[in-house]
Amino acid sequence: MVSASQLAAFAALTFVMVVVPGPSVLFTISRALTVGRRDALLTVLGNAAGVYAQVVAVAFGLGTIVERSATVFTIVKLAGAAYLVYLGVQAWRHRRSLADVFSAGIEATRGRTLRVLRDGFVVGFLNPKSIVFLAAVLPQFVNQQAGSVPLQILVLGVLLPVIAVLSDSAWAFVAGTARDWFARSPRRLELVGGAGGLTMIGLGATLAFTGRKD
């Protein structure tokens, strides 16, 4: 079984990786600015579920395949990049709708819960950086003599989405508050919607051109 020292050591390393702003943080901020705090928090939950799905995949061998195969890595990377770009284009196309809604004095239309969760899940699951991180680092904290290696990976891997939810939720609240300020002006809100879309497109493009560090 997993010991307290294993949990503490992996939690410390995971915390350092998560708190440093990366694609997931920027994606969350973009969602908060574009569609609001509620959808951003749902995105955080979906993203955490996607990351833990990676943990499950690593536990049963997919992480090793991705780590060793440049072809599989590229496929996963491009799929994640394409999805981010798609979401960014949608946000850019509808950037004026938020301004129109606030100008009319009514609440902005929220995305369907399952759809928002799905978007976060897909982005989280198709993040090749976290797959490689989990595949390369997580097995090092497993005690082979303790047995049930997949179970140890599943238990240790819970720390990543839990810490990510806490950190990304904080960013979502901060960005959501900033959005409220922007919402006082339709022009500001239109700019925010466009900026959020461009940010997601930029994240997708950056991910697409990021190579393996091996």
Image (cartoon, rainbow, N blue to C red):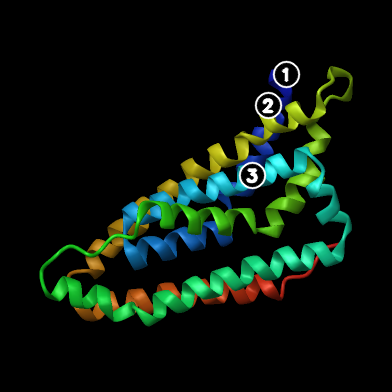
Q: Which residue is mark 3?
A: 53
What amino acid type is highlighted by mark number 3? Ala
Graded by Cα atoms within 10 Å as few (under 14), some (14 to 19) or many (20 or more), the crowding at tag 2 reads some
Give me the residue at 23% from left, 81% from top.
187
Q: Which of the two discs, 3 and 1, labels the residue nearer the N terminus?
A: 1
Asked which secondary structure carries label 3, the reply is: helix
Report which quarter residue 48 is drawn in: top right
* Quarter in which the C terminus is drawn: bottom right
Between marks 3 and 1 in the image, the one whose residue lies nearer the viewer: 3
Residue 157 locus on image (x, y percent): 67, 36
What amino acid type is highlighted by mark number 1? Ser
Q: CA distance from mark 2 to mark 3?
A: 19 Å
Front residue of this view, candidates 183 and 70? 70
Do labels 1 and 2 touch, CB within 8 Å? yes
- Answer above or below: position of 6 versus 118: above
Residue 65 locus on image (x, y percent): 85, 52
User: In screen coordinates, is 118 left or right of 160?
Assistant: left
Front residue of this view, candidates 126 and 179? 126
User: In screen coordinates, is 173 left or right of 204?
Assistant: left
Q: CA distance from mark 3 to mark 1?
A: 23 Å
Q: Which residue is mark 2?
A: 7
What amino acid type is highlighted by mark number 2? Leu
Asked which secondary structure carries label 1, the reply is: loop
Report which quarter residue 66 is drawn in: bottom right
Q: CA distance from mark 1 to mark 2?
A: 6 Å
Q: Which residue is mark 1?
A: 3
Residue 25 locus on image (x, y percent): 51, 57
